[in-house]
Amino acid sequence: MAEGSIHKGLVGVLADETAISKVDPEKRRLTYRGYPVDQLAEKCSFEEVAYLLFNGELPTSAKLKAFEKAERAARELTRDQIAMIKLFPKSAHPMDTIRTAVSYLGTREVAWGGEPAKADLARGLDLLAKIPTMIATDFRFRSGKPRIKPNPKLSFAANFFHMCFGKVPPDNVVKAFDISLTCYAEHSFNASTFADRVIASTRADIYSSITGAIGALKGPLHGGANEAVMDMLSEIGSAKRAEKWLRPRIAKKQLVMGFGHRVYRWGDSRVPIMRRCLEELSDWAGDRRWIEISDVLENIMVGEKKIYPNLDFPSGPVYYLMGFPINLYTPIFVAARITGWVAHYLEQNADNQLIRPLSAYTGPTDRDVTPINKR
């Protein structure tokens, strides 16, 4: 890299080291702490993956049981937190409400970065437990329905369905949701994680870092892409219209949501397992419309443009078939990615240096100020 060269979007820049996850685009491979994400999604619960990201190793049965017990015990909100969520405008996007709810959570104590890792690990577990409750509580209130308390007898994935809908779907649906959480849990130095680490590097508290990360995730070029995918599929409406919808956008070189990735050039390693979930849920729901539209788009984009789908492409319709409203997809992403964000916050604090890049100034130079009466 040439000295003084500019890399827009920090493309190709190595900002730091991490032991949390590795993206290998040549092998289409993503690993968490050395474990392939597809194996984790198939063989482990999301709680096991959360423990792995927080602690560096997969848990034993005893450690997992203790972790699950602590997470379940921390799910409920206080009266003031519930009252605060109830005051949110019903027109607000759920990403704005969860961002604000997390920030409010940080007002319970005066915390700073650089405190013992044990303290921030406990805060991270509390965030993991409470964020789904906050999301579901806001969802119920904005729907004009009473909130449903978390059920400590249910798994992380099953409890979210319970809090949102008052019932838990069949095991295969819960497993598909659990798989999606694992796939979204961590992805190296993506935009929101880098925002998390930048804020952590100032020695700000974990709540400030997570609030900033949520703000970064909201954008449609990052976490909001899963919502944009479903909006796109809904606009197309049927497989018969898909090619006619797509061709003009290709000709104009317009962005097609759910395709392409800053890192993956030859496909996203998380897509195959989410595609299998989409196949299963389409059959379960008796609705193959979204998968048929997706197939037309993918065949053209991959076959002609060599642009591959990313995780958001199958996950959008997967969440739709589960019954979640479109504006809840990115908050669900938050509920998963909190695990990676906490891990990166801890890692940044363990060997911290303030992140402060340089910039190349391009404005006017060497100007003298003229008194106002002579301008």
Image (cartoon, rainbow, N blue to C red):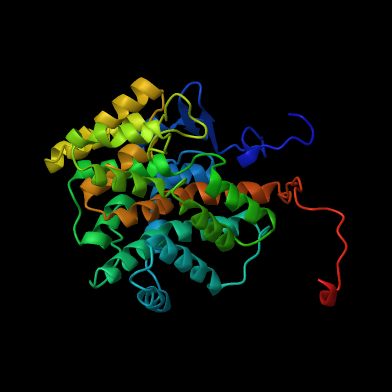
In the picture, measured across the screen, residue 96 lies left or right of residue 237, that is right
**At x 67% / y 39%, what residue is drawn?**
15
Q: State the image coordinates of residue 216 (x, y, percent, origin top left).
A: 52, 53
- Image quadrant containing the N terminus: top right
In the picture, measured across the screen, residue 281 lies left or right of residue 263, that is left
Residue 97 is drawn in which quadrant? bottom left
Q: In the orientation shown, which residue stands out farthest toward the front?
A: 374
Q: State the image coordinates of residue 130 (x, y, percent, origin top left).
A: 41, 62
**At x 33% / y 29%, what residue is drawn?**
272
Residue 132 is drawn in which quadrant? bottom left
Q: State the image coordinates of residue 177 (x, y, percent, origin top left).
A: 29, 45
Q: In the orientation shown, which residue stands out farthest toward the left?
A: 286
Q: Nearer the viewer, residue 195 or 17?
A: 195
In the picture, measured across the screen, residue 189 lies left or right of residue 300, that is right
Q: Nearer the viewer, residue 101 or 229?
A: 229
Total numbered labels placed on residues in the image: 0
Q: Nearer the viewer, residue 158 or 341?
A: 341
- Image quadrant containing the C terminus: bottom right
Q: Is residue 29 visible?
A: yes
Q: Nearer the viewer, residue 69 or 101?
A: 101
Q: State the image coordinates of residue 145 (x, y, percent, origin top left).
A: 22, 71
Q: Is residue 174 visible?
A: no
**At x 76% / y 52%, what residue is drawn?**
363
